[in-house]
Image: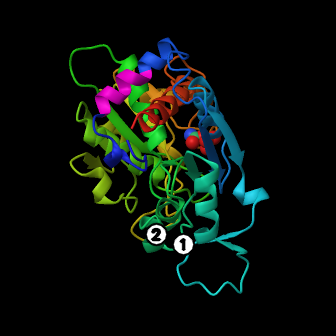
Amino acid sequence: MKKFLSVHDVPNISSLISQALTYKADPQKDRSLGSGKRIGLLFLNPSMRTRLSTQIAAQNLGMEAIVFNVGQDGWALEFEEEAIMSGSTVEHVKEAAPILGKYFDILGVRTFPSLKNKEEDYHELYINQFVKYSGIPIVSLESATVHPLQSLTDLITITETFKEKRKPKIVLTWAPHVKALPQCVANSFAEWINAWGNAEFVITHPEDYELDKRFTQQATITTHQDEALKDADFVYVKNWSTYTDYGRVYCNDPKWMLTHKKLELTNHAKVMHCLPVRRNIELSDEVLDSKNSLVTQQAVNRVWAAQTVLSEILKR
Ligand code: CP
């Protein structure tokens, strides 16, 4: 792989999942692959899992990882072409990215959407400017519209958990939240499940929370959560703000929170969430603390997803 910005950079999802499970069984098996190489991990926004799991993944491959919290420690970056920089931004990505491209062999970038300007967010201006000007492979640590390392992790988790011969029924359900969140995780999960093709896939959300069709494609979509949950093997819980009338919170109905009662509709479904999660807003204590919850397993699997992606880039 030359870069990892979305599922479109992946030639074979199933082989990536197999590779990740190989790393899970033997984390040190390629410990010399990244010897003498350095990855920069740039965070324009906060993170716990992505930051730490990618650092561990790089170490497992013998790479040095340097984290730079641009949002807190760095100069405010400008991304617009031909900007007149008379405002708060101090350094243009046209200067910063080529320098980072000389410091590092791979660059990971986390950059959330504004949720104010749909066109700018959905053109992925920020991460694409790093691709354009750094001259080295870029790995998305979550961008304005997708979170591919999370989605690869989610497929690894589903694959190692579901042992039946048939396709699992996977439900992505919207959940309430106290603030407007990006569509990234939901977009990306839908895009990866569709590209993988090994599941019956249903998305459920309140009216007006439709995601961009580019990501949902052939998934079954319903506003009836109970109907969607019927016989589900996996329920992926996630809040997102509105896409059409961009970045708004129209509904915060607590009835959309997943509870034990709702899980009775499912096929003893395993429950997934990318974390961080707002307890008793998005997901109830009783579900998060139950044996149905896969959230810790998912977060741990972030290491193997990152290790696999870095190894594929190092081998190119
Ligand atoms: N799921 C996830 O990306 O977690 P962090 O925001 O903590 O990295």
Give the residue type that dot 2 points to: Tyr
User: What residue is disc 2 on?
Assistant: 246
Q: Is residue 124 above or below residue 146?
A: below
Q: Is residue 120 above or below residue 182?
A: below
Residue 120: x, y in percent? 47, 72
Residue 157: x, y in percent? 43, 25
- Kindly state the secondary structure of the residue where label 1 is placed: loop
What's the CA distance linking mark 2 and mark 1?
7 Å
Residue 232 can be seen in this image: no
Give the prevailing secondary structure in the magenta stretch. helix
In the shown orientation, is residue 202 left or right of residue 82?
A: left
> Which one is in front in this view, the residue at disc 2 or the one at disc 1?
1
Q: Pick whichever, 259 or 237, lies toward us.
A: 237
**Circle 2/circle 1 CB separation < 8 Å:** yes
- Quarter of the view holding residue 300: top right
Inspect the magenta stretch and tell me whether residue 5 lies in it.
Answer: no
Residue 220: x, y in percent? 24, 45
User: What residue is disc 1 on?
Assistant: 116
- Kindly state the secondary structure of the residue where label 2 is placed: loop
Q: Residue at x 53, y 65 (%)?
A: 126
Q: Residue at x 58, y 55 (%)?
A: 101
Ligand 1 quadrant in view: top right
Query: Could you classify mark 1 by the number of other residues whose Cα lies within 10 Å: few (under 14), some (14-19), or many (20 or more)?
Result: few
